[in-house]
Amino acid sequence: MKTVLVVGLKGGTGKSSVAVMLAMHLSQSNRDTILVDADVDSPNLADILKVDSKIKIEPNRIEVVHLDNLDFFSFGLITKDRAVSMRGESYVQMLLDVLQFAEWKVNLKNAIMIIDCPAGASDLFRGVLKAYYQTIVGAVVVTIPSAWRDLKRLLGILKYYNVPVIGVINNMAYFRCEHGKEYRFFGESRAEEICKEFNVLYLGEIPLSPEIFEILQAGVPIVPPEVEPIMQRIAERIDELKPVGSSILDRIMKRVSDSVKKNMVKAVAKTIIKLNKSVNLKKLTDSGFGGNVIEFIIHSGGDIVTQVYLKLTDGRLIVLKEPKTVNITIMTDVNTLFRLAKDELDLETAYLMGEIEVLGSTGTTRTLSFLQEMWSHMKDEIIEVAKDEVA
């Protein structure tokens, strides 16, 4: 199976319409095709496809909708109009269940799965990567002319997660009136220029067209003629590509050896000793950080490698055994620490990309400042632990 993500950093770019048109093109080209609406907050593919049936879920069995050479699944057909606010890990498990238990009619082994991803690049997007990283061949990026900054950010995010970009579509690029004059309501696009900067394929423009809108609104199972060449280029690219098979998320989930776990515990202990000897911790104490209990967790593939409780008091960092309260929790993965030690990553980026989590009520910025101070003394110890490891 090959999985293709249709992505956009913001809503309103026409991403869902592109996902539907791509799935229709592939299915009408005699390719076994699966279309998944992976949005739990605002699923809309069922409306575009004029599908109104309710999907049943039973133990080891999930119904899907069978269209012409196209299997369709949407969270919206499960939830209907019910309120939904799903946690990230529950969302990942649901995606995995869909892959494993759905009653696909198409040949799953040879199928192309098109996933209309939730807008944005936070927990739900990471959930899609976690669930399907072994079969992902790339992402189709949908943007509009006014969202060029979002396009740059999204291409950077995909590069960070090692997701190949199949190409970029500039949607709603212009409107052509009945006299043939073009109007660019969203301004001149910088998409082609940005694609060159990131060395990715620019697939072209889709106009703001009443004809396209009417075809999609009517649920007519055809791809509009002005869109067909773009869909064909994507199909050709999909045929050429193979699943990446590995990603940063894959490596994040990788478990480390028992010896590394033991050495990691020692590295944390040595760091605390170093901090007490060579850092003016009183400055941090006086800044309002003192007296807080800090829970520091390093994990690997879901297993806790080390968990230590620290308290900054009287200019010293002390270790607590079983504190009654915790003010701040800092969580990260062993492999993130390895990548930080090898300068493949910096602390700010690790935080912004969700690889370091900071929870608590004392302020993220102060916590990150403390972590920066701690890291400057921890780095050498991590390098020693990581010297025989590949992150």
Image: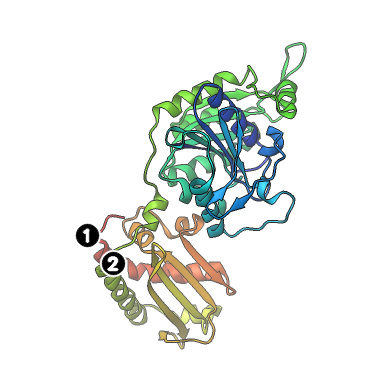
Q: Name the residue under label 1.
A: 388
Quadrant location of residue 215?
Answer: top right
Q: Is residue 126 visible?
A: no
> From the viewer's perspective, is residue 304 above or below residue 14?
below
Q: Residues within 10 Å of mark 1 (few under 14, many from 20)?
A: few
Q: In this rendering, would 219 be left or right of 267? A: right
Q: Which residue lies furthest to the left in this view?
A: 388
Give the CA separation, mark 1 to mark 2.
14 Å
Mark 1, mark 2: which one is toward the viewer? Answer: 1
The residue at the point 56 percent across, 38 percent down is 151
The residue under label 1 is which amino acid type?
Asp
Q: Quadrant of the C terminus?
A: bottom left
Disc 2 is placed on an element classified as helix
Residue, far top: 179
* Mark 1 vs 2: CB contact within 8 A: no
- Kindly identify which numbered label has been placed on residue 59: none
Give the mark, 1 or 2, whose residue is nearer the N terminus: 2
The quarter in which the N terminus is drawn is top left
Percent across and percent down for residue 346 are 41, 57
In the rendered structure, which amino acid carries the disc numbered 2? Asp
Label number found at residue 380: 2
Q: Where is residue 252 in the image (x, y as percent from the top left)?
A: 39, 56
**Residue 295 as seen in the image, left or right of residue 377:** right
* Point 46% across, 88% down: residue: 314
Along the viewing direction, whichever of 244 and 355 lies nearer the viewer: 244
Residues 46 and 209: in front is 46
